[in-house]
Amino acid sequence: MNLAGMTPEDRDALAGEYVLGTLEAREAAAVAAALPGDAALAEAVAQWEARLAPLTALAPPEAPPPELWDRIVASLDPAPAPKPRRSWLARLRDPWRITAIGGTALAAGLAAFILLRPEPAPRLMTVLLTEQDQPAWLVEADGGGIRLASLNPRPAPEGRALQLWALPQGATAPTSLGLIPAQGRISVSPATIRPSPGMLIEITLEPPGGSPIGRPTGPILFIGRLAPATGS
Amino acid sequence: MDAATDLTPLLSAVANGDRQALRAVYERQSVRLFGVANAILRDRDSAADALQDAFLRIAQRAHQFDPDRGTAEAWLAAIVRYAALDMARARGREIPTDDPALGDQPVEAEALERVSASAEGRRLHQCLATLEERNRRGIVLAFVHGLSHAQISARLELPLGTVKAWIRRGLLRLRECLA
């Protein structure tokens, strides 16, 4: 979709369709990504929002689940990591033994992965925005791999690191995908999780070397949810 | 208490990181906003996920709310709709649309009364009334229930191209009528 090459009339209609919600994922993502740098388009979207807003009254009001506010608070402040409990197995055996068991299990998992050759998954993507809604990072995933590219490279603050995390839907704690190198690109194939639609991708500010506890300790700087890149 | 005059200062407090203000916004608006998300997703669990996403965005973007450009209620509802639509798209919009009540009921008197509660709503209602029935239904199905062009075309048994063209025509006629 070439936004710049459109007539003003077509751009206004596109803004209307964006607000109406009929655009497919890729078109909607293109409009959302263009908005911060395109004041005229943003104005057209704001006008359509104002025109159509009274229609939201057609949705019957309904009480949300009672625990939802607590979930919102929990996602605003990622909880500190629970103290790892040493299992009876860990107490009985020395750490090297555990690592060996883990390694075997991992190898078996890899073999199963290679043997089973899962169905090719749809390409997923999301754009992580800054607080000012500037597109900052492009995240793409297909198969088991996740790629992150900076759209607006800026180094991490002095003495801090940017760490990438994935939170599959239904999971209670995010999984680290690693530290983001200075050049702003990273490509990973996590062993324990598979990219899936709805998975949250987030970047947090951490001490050098990354979070020492395996869960985010610093603020979430960027966040987005993977969605299928339809039409591609 | 008037929701519109009430919400604007709350949102500026939210912009300054005031958690109590965010909670107050939630308490005043969550029933209405959960309804907006649930009308699009038609699944309470997904609607709760969408409302959670939306409140993260509200906390992050409250400083962007500009009372000169629209009401706080409209701003909040727009964020919830985009969060719900993102989720609907992420699920490939595999949301049952064969509920016979869908999109036919909104024209019920009580719902129209809610739309017409504001001056803007009354004007929009009058302008919608000038559209052909199928244009009006297409716009309502899309806006309220998050149906894509393809789903509307399946539901109203009309070719996709036709649906796209007359939804666009309906929007442009609305814009003229409201101008």
Image: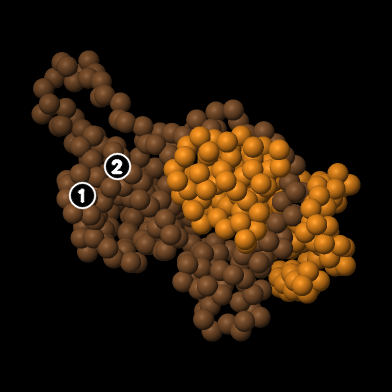
Q: Which residue is mark 2?
A: A218
Q: Chain A appears what colour?
A: brown
Q: Pointer 1: residues within 10 angstroms few (<14), some, or many (20+)?
A: some
Residue found at x 49% / y 70%: A34
Residue at mark 1: chain: A
Rendered view: B43 above or below A100: below
Res A43 → quadrant: bottom right
Horizontal side, residue B105 vs residue B6: left or right = right
Is label 2 in a helix, a strand or a loop?
loop
Horizontal side, residue A50 vs residue B137: left or right = left
Residue found at x 51% / y 64%: A32
Q: Which mark is residue A5?
A: none
Residue at mark 2: chain: A
Q: Pointer 2: residues within 10 angstroms few (<14), some, or many (20+)?
A: some
Q: Chain B appears what colour?
A: orange
Amino acid beneath label 1: Arg
Q: Which residue is mark 1?
A: A160
User: How is the model colour-coded?
Assistant: by chain
Q: Nearer the viewer, residue A13 or B75?
A: B75
* Lower position in the chain sequence, tag 2 or tag 1: 1
Rendered view: A178 above or below A26: above
Tell me whether circle 2 and circle 1 mark residues in contact (CB < 8 Å). Answer: yes
Residue found at x 68% / y 61%: A50
Horizontal side, residue B37 vs residue B122: left or right = left
**Residue B62 seen in this snapshot:** yes
Residue B154 position in % (x across, y down): 74, 60
Residue A210 position in % (x across, y down): 21, 44
**Residue B91 seen in this snapshot:** no
Residue found at x 41% / y 51%: A223
Amino acid beneath label 2: Gly
Residue A1 position in % (x across, y down): 53, 76
